[in-house]
Image: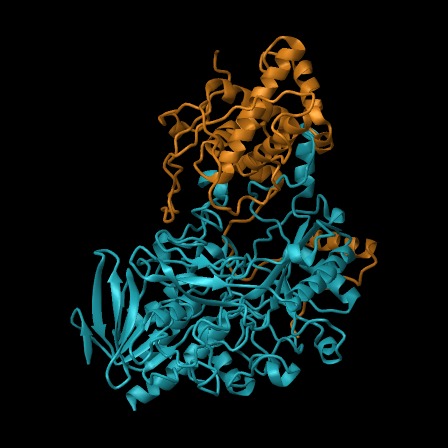
Amino acid sequence: MSKIYNPKMSRRESLKRIGTMATVVMVGGVPVACDPVEPETSTASPTPTGGHWPGLELEAITGPTYGTDPIMTSPEAPWPLTLTDVQRDLAAVLSDMICPADERGPAATDVGVPDVIDEWMSAPYSRQQSDRVQIINGLQWLDDEAELRFGSNFVAATEDQRIAIIEDIAYRAQYDVPEFELPARFFSRMRSLVFGAYFTTPEGIEDIGYVGNVAIAGEYPGPTSEAMEHIREVAESLDLPPITEYVNQ
Amino acid sequence: MASFEDFEYQVIVVGSGAGGGMAAHVLTEAGVKVLMLEAGRDYDPITETPMFQQNHEAPLRGTSTSEKNFGYYDATVDGGWRVPGEPYSEAPDSRFMWWRARMLGGRTNHWGRLVPRFTPADFKPYSTDGVGTDWPVDYDEISPWYDKCEELIGVCGDNPGLDDTPSSSDGVLLPPPKPRVMELLLKSACESLGIDAVPMRRAILTEAKDDRQACFWATPCGRGCSIGAAFQSTTSLLPWANNTGNLKIVTDAMVREVHLDDEGNASGVTFVNKTSGEDVRIDGEHIILAASACETARLLLNSKSEAFPNGLANSSGQVGRNLTDSLGAGISGYIPALRDRPRYNEDGHSGNHLYIPWWDREGQKNGSLNFSRGYHFEVGARFSSPGMGVAGRVDGYGKAAKDDVRSNYGTGIGLSLRGEMLVSDDCYCEIDDEVTDQWGIPVLKFHWKWSEQEINQVAHGLEWGKKIIEAMGGIVNNPDRAAEEAIEEGGQIIHEVGTTRMGEDPATSVCNEWGQTWDVENLYVMDGGVFVSNPHKNCTITILTLAMRNATRLAEQLTA
């Protein structure tokens, strides 16, 4: 298949890709603190009632980690990327459905979100490896579902056809629909990763309006007058005592 | 005088964090020669701290992994909840989390820098409520040392004059930063509930001090601070001590044992040179242990002799006992009224500018509470650098979902309960006879069990946390979570203390009020091990202050 998504991070291009499909399911060893997103993994049986789920088992990733003493001033992810071209194209199409361009910011693929997903899923840590099992299966489910519904893979389907599928799995309420529970949980995880990846890019940071990480001389400026005015109105609307700037006693 | 590699010294200090760093500073300033042994590697915050690096530059956007438990950029070297090659064990049905760092400066490189003072009642818990044991020192005696210590390290904050917030002397504190809008709303909500939210004291320079720069209000303190504005021993105490010419630091030196001579004095230590793997035995006239409460207890318990078959300085049997951590639990929510609130720079000093001190000492006195002591709430509520969790509970997809992430940004609030657990016979560490680390040193086994006291306190905190967030017009996440579920693991707050407690009676304590062991005259403990109780106020400022006071006395004796 032709490649429709070109990686944005050139440092990745030289990294060797390793095979994805194999026999063993990776299970994390130690319980680890991860990103604060709630787990979207399922406790349900691996085959949804009345639905289908690929149930692909993946070879454990045992590639190099960054260790317990990385050089933090020049960060590097040492593990090879593992998504196949087909998976990356699928992830790219899905990323842009989740996070399209609009008047306030670019689309996910414009800022390299699929590269981040690939780095994430290829990482030899327990949380990422469990994400990998869920997401590889989820991507395959999209293809299978498109095949069943439209006789086409997901990427080759029309936009309306893709939306028809996504509309069935994009909402948490659909965890309760037996045939869509696993795909819906996959989608939730994917949404979290896509927005996480997008809003951490320089473009995403600007989009969301984070204006910190700049050195300021003198005292901390504190809230702007606009922000103070707003919080005063909020306090008033909540019937709270008036906001006063804290004064030293 | 003892010597090592042509350096003559009077005192060996084991550990280079808060206690060890302060002891070395005080002693070397007084002209005493000090040999410092640090189990971790050499570390230079000036060149190694990732200042201004952003999440997108880090693997996995800086997310926590099993190798970097507090995120990629956390300062901790070769440590966290696991140290490679250095396991510990837990008794059946016990869970204990032990954070360690293997680096010069130890855990002072990444700590929260929250520095509330203990109150007079905190030093006299038994006299106050009839539970536990009084400290052999009181507030009046320690208060001038708090002043000296705060002035030395640099503390921003103020003196709100509440009974949970003892005041510093005039001119000691640096000005606190202005609160952010969420903290102002919190303060207003607290006012409606009859409680206070006041500036959090932090060991952050809001004005330049000696050769350290003032905070420039950017980059999280947990990474370490290359400009010295956020206090850590590696940008202050250790370089100052080095400048006197009276200090020699040996890194990668993991102390295995403290030796005893025939007269009953400590005669030196053996450490593992981690680079060569060889044991090195050195002499010492005075030995200060400041390896952290649990490492110091481990070292004493592993130093067995005919005179002390159960571990050095352990005739009381108290070494490793009385282990406490701060009680921890979190409650969070979001404030819909703050969706799309005006953007501005809320980095500040990267910690909470306001916090909620314990407010109900009256309730304790009149018996209306079903637990002893109290807690405070730390506050997390600001526009922070987006991370992988930024989407939160957003549902759906496409532009609507993207807009939702934008609107929700900066509407979340987290309250972290930090409470006082009671000293308990159920919580202690001992040597595991069956497990050794990669250097062949027997490891610690932890025993832990929360009591009703802790569960009740967390239940109270969850109820109040809910009230506070709801008063802000907020929606609480997990409003029905039970205290048993919300309570964090023992050790998880990283305030473990008490394993070599001081006291007035050699039969029930390990050290006297000067941190000097009752059993061995020239052996001192200057880390959190000496704590008699663990008031809810974060422990480091009191570790620093006691080390300053006790090292000053030792210096006076050695230079007299």
User: Would residue B211 be seen by someone viewing this image from the given angle?
Assistant: no
At x 42%, y 32%, the residue is A61
Relative to residue B103, is residue B286 depicted above or below?
A: below
Viewer-side residue, A87 vs A205: A87
Viewer-side residue, B381 vs A215: B381
Q: Is residue B182 left or right of residue B320?
A: right
Q: Is residue B246 left or right of residue B413?
A: left
At x 47%, y 19%, the residue is A85
Q: Colour of chain A?
A: orange
Image quarter hosting the C terminus of chain B: bottom left
At x 80%, y 63%, the residue is A241
Counting from the top left corner in percent of width and height, residue B332 is at 67, 53
Give the chain ID for the cyan colour.
B
Task: Pick out the residue farthest to the top.
Answer: A151
Counting from the top left corner in percent of width and height, residue B13 is at 32, 73
Task: Pick out the residue farthest to the bottom.
Answer: B560
Q: Is residue A119 left or right of residue A161?
A: left
Counting from the top left corner in percent of width and height, residue B407 is at 69, 41
Q: Quadrant of residue B400?
A: top right
Relative to residue B166, is residue B78 depicted above or below?
A: above
Counting from the top left corner in percent of width and height, residue B47 is at 35, 54
